[in-house]
Image: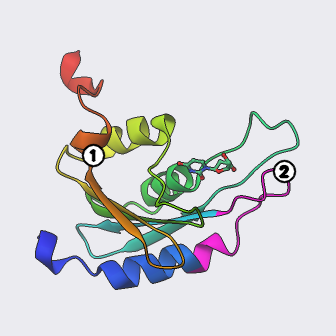
Amino acid sequence: MANDIPWERLFEEAARVRSRAHVPYSRFPVGAAILYSDGAVVPGCNVENATYGLTICAERNAFAAGVAQGHGKPVAVAIVVDTPEPCPPCGMCRQVMAEFGESDLPVRSRTPKGAEARYTLGELLPHAFTKAFF
Ligand SMILES: O=c1ccn([C@H]2C[C@H](O)[C@@H](CO)O2)c(=O)[nH]1
């Protein structure tokens, strides 16, 4: 499966949705795109709020949309952030990814200039808390 992942398409989608991010406070737009086992690609951007604390990250918005749209297993996650070095997802987003994805879920982060970091979910969140424990 890993070789079949259309990463360029995922990064294009993540970059496209990143331009829609609602970031009047941080001015730090993030875009994410999830590929599902049914072939669907679901994008998400970060959406901030005047209370600050209600901000939701791009990755979590994409996962929530995937649930609402009824897709199956996530098989790849692409993230686009404009940082000097490619930026990994935050801890809350890692935990949400672990709700739906396996530890071998590939997660890649790219900057608009093309620098890229490659992870698996298991590397990002070892010893994840999941429903397997209860
Ligand atoms: O993994 C992350 C980390 C941060 N952000 C957003 C939240 C906030 O809007 C902005 C600055 O933290 O970036 C994401 O979308 N994903």
Q: From the Cβ of disc 2, is ligand 1 less than 8 Å away?
A: yes
Residue where numbered disc 2 is placed: 25
Residue 11 place in picture, x, y as percent: 43, 77
Residue 75 place in picture, x, y as percent: 24, 62
- Is residue 13 found inside the magenta-colored segment of the image? no
Residue where numbered disc 1 is placed: 121
- Which residue shows up at 52% across the image and 49% down it? 60
Report the amino acid beneath label 1: Leu
Separation of marks 2 and 1 at Cα, in angstroms:
29 Å
Of the pair 4 and 37, the residue shown nearer to us: 4
Residue 43 place in picture, x, y as percent: 51, 69
Q: Give the range drawn in magenta.
A: 16-29
Query: Which class describes the residues within 10 Å of circle 1: few (<14), some (14-19), or many (20+)?
Result: many
Report the amino acid beneath label 2: Tyr
- Is residue 20 found inside the magenta-colored segment of the image? yes
Secondary structure of the residue carrying tag 1 is helix
